[in-house]
Image: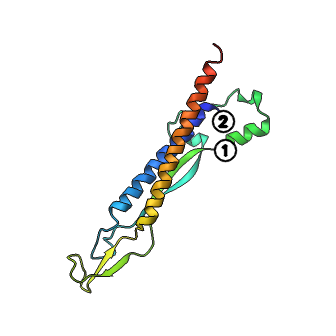
Amino acid sequence: MSLQNIFNVAGSGMSAQSIRLNTVSSNIANAEAASSSEGETYRARKPIFSAMAQEQMRMQGSLGVNNAGGGAYMSGFENQAEQSASQGVAVKGIVESQAPLQPRYEPNHPSADENGYVFYPNVNVVEEMADMISASRSFQMNVEVMNTAKTMIQQVLTLGQ
């Protein structure tokens, strides 16, 4: 993998973690949103990630670098492995959790149904906070990867001086 491809991989990771942070913040914001029916109640959302091949990144407008001429320093096996390896992460979609909602007996609540139950979302705030910390750290690691690659490129450019 060339140093220039590293920016694409880290950038796709940062984008994916941003989406993950947005879904976590939406879940936390709606954790205590009460409703009178199961159909109207907010359900926790989770992003679905998948590895993205180099060709997919090019189709999505990323600055994919063609590896033409790169085989001079790589054996055929290594070149094939590089071409078939994943080159980033894609967000396939955001799905709603199918975990059961939390019905609570609160007959004096303004949103209570005819039986006195209020439905709360299936959001576990502790899990969401752990997911938020994980996404934040993953984002930070991708930033560090980009900074390290930038430093390496700058050092390579100064070799000829």
Residue sitting at the far top: 161
Quadrant assignment for the N terminus: top right
**Where's residue 78, x and y in %?**
76, 38
The C terminus lies in which quarter of the figure? top right
Q: Amino acid at mark 1?
A: Ala
Residue named by callout 1: 85
Q: Quadrant of residue 132?
A: bottom left
Q: Position of residue 21 (x, y in %)?
A: 43, 52
Query: Is residue 65 in sight in this rendering?
Result: no
Residue beneath the point at 44% across and 62% down: 128
- The x and y percentages for residue 101 are 39, 75
Distance between the Cα atoms at labels 1 and 2? 10 Å
Can you tell which of label 1 and label 2 is closer to the viewer? 2
* In-image side of 143 versus 119 (left or right): right
Label 1 CA crowd tier, 10 Å (few <14, some 14–19, many 20+): few
State the residue position of label 2. Answer: 1
Residue 120 seen in render? yes
Vertical comparison of 136 with 153: above or below: below
In the image, taking residue 76 as reference, residue 134 lies left or right, namely: left
- Regarding mark 2 in the picture, which secondary structure is present there? loop
- Element under label 1? loop
Front one among 60 and 108: 108
Going by the picture, which residue comes out furthest to the bottom? Answer: 115
Mark 2 residue type: Met
The reply to whether dot 1 and dot 2 touch (C-beta < 8 Å) is yes
Measured as percent of width and height from the top left, residue 22 is found at 40, 53
